[in-house]
Structure formats: structure tokens, C-alpha cells
Image (cartoon, rainbow, N blue to C red):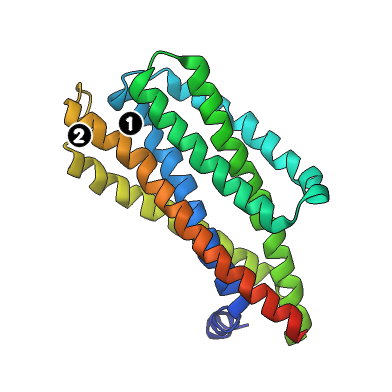
Amino acid sequence: MSLKEIYQLILQNHLFLSYILYFFFFQLSFEWMNSYNIYYFKYSINQDYFFSIYAFTILAQLFGASLYPRLAKLISKQLIFYLSACLSILGMLALFIVGQTLPDNSLLMFFAASIKQIGSGLFMVTATHDLAWVIDISSQKTGKYYPAILTSAKLLVAKLSTSLTALGIGFGLHFAGYVNNQRQTPHTALLISLQTFGIPIIFVVISLIGYHFYRQMVQHEKRTS
């Protein structure tokens, strides 16, 4: 296929575009938090060793992903996505509150980070499942099966979120008045904290709105199939 045909295939697939909308903003939240947390732990709450603790909670993310098959037997896949969003937001809020009130409490910090990571793990499996469903429905409607193209398009969107995160962090730290390798002023420390968690929470909320449109599109496809 030519590059033009590939673009047409993607842009004409409205179900895939609605999927990408919610995926992009949740992934952007995920990338932003993972990239910004070193500045939060080291320069905002002056507990740089917490970065290692946070990195260790990747095990909680794997645990969250492993919960998906069990949860899918108990609740709908739509509720699983809402659960992943709620856990992600609650975890980030808890990280912010603990950092502002009990910055020396590594146990609470670990617990809050684990809640957030469980939400991220559920999201990753949900997004993978939804992509498989989008590919299957698209092949039934068009008679053409191009999983590699749609999967690659999702990967490009994920890489785009990484690039935008790097750009956003640069502007955000400059706006906060960040000075490298120095103790930050209270005002800068607070702005870094708000940027670390406030911005990704907003992205998750936007993703929830996008997911609502995606589910509407899913219902439309079911009625017309």
C-alpha cells in the first residue's frame, strides 16, 4: 500500500479515531507523570530516593494488568476503564497530599504510587483489548484486514505523547522558575507539585470524555453490524 492509502485507511476509520482520542490523552497522562516525578521527588519534596521507590511500583502496574481477566468476569469492560481512571486519579491525588503533608513517610508514598500504577496497568490492558476489537470490527465492515497498520498508528500516537511530554515539561519547569541542581524556592516547589499531578489528572478527565464518545461509536457499530 502507498503512504496515501495508509493515511486514508486510518482517517476513514471513525471507530479507530474515537479510540485514539481516549488512548492519546490517557497515555499522555501516563508519560507526563513518569517523566515529571523525578523533579517532584528531588526538587519539590526533597526526597529524591522516593524516585527509586516509585520505580519499584512497576510491579503494582503488572499486578493491575493481571487483574483484568478476573475483573472482566465480574464487571463490564467499560467499568474496568472507569476503575482504571479513578485509581489513577486517586493515586496521583494521594501522592500530592502525602508529599505536601508527610514527605518523609515512604510507606504512604509507596501505597499511593501503587494505587496509581494499578490504574495504569488496567488501562494498558483495556486499551490493548479495545484496539483488538477495533481491528476486528474494521475488518468485518471493510473486508480488509490490516492489523499492522492500525497497531503502528497507535504506536506512533504513543510516541507523539512522549514527544509532547518532553516539550511540555521543558516549558513547565521554565514557567515554575526551576533552577537545575539547586534547592527550589517554596513557590517553585509548589508549582512543580501542581504540574506533576494536576496536568495528568486533567488529561485523564479528557480521556474519560473521549472514552464516552468511543463507547457511543461502539454502540453505533453494534446496531449497524
Q: Which mark is residue 189?
A: none
Q: Quadrant of residue 221?
A: bottom right
**In-front residue for pair 65/8:** 65
**In-front residue for pair 54/94:** 94
Can you identify the residue that label 2 sits on? 178
Q: Residue at left 41%, top 24%?
A: 98
Q: Quadrant of residue 172?
A: top left
Disc 1 to disc 2, C-alpha distance: 9 Å
Amino acid identity at mark 2: Tyr
The C terminus appears in which quarter of the rendering? bottom right
Q: Could you say where residue 179 lies in the image, as x and y percent from the top left?
A: 18, 31
**Position of 54 relative to 215 (above/below):** above
Which is more N-terminal, label 2 or label 1? Answer: 1
Q: Residue at left 48%, top 22%?
A: 109
**Position of 216 relative to 1 (above/below):** above
**Which element type, helix, strand or loop, lies under badge 2?**
loop
Q: Could you say where residue 94 lies in the image, as x and y percent from the top left?
A: 46, 31
Q: Which mark is residue 39?
A: 1
Q: Could you say where residue 132 lies in the image, as x and y percent from the top left?
A: 73, 64
Residue reaching furthest to the right: 73
**Which element type, helix, strand or loop, lies under badge 1?**
helix
Task: Sort mark 1 into few (<14), some (14-19) or many (20+) by Cα contacts within 10 Å.
Answer: many
**Position of 47 relative to 21 (above/below):** above
Task: Sort mark 2 into few (<14), some (14-19) or many (20+) by Cα contacts within 10 Å.
Answer: many
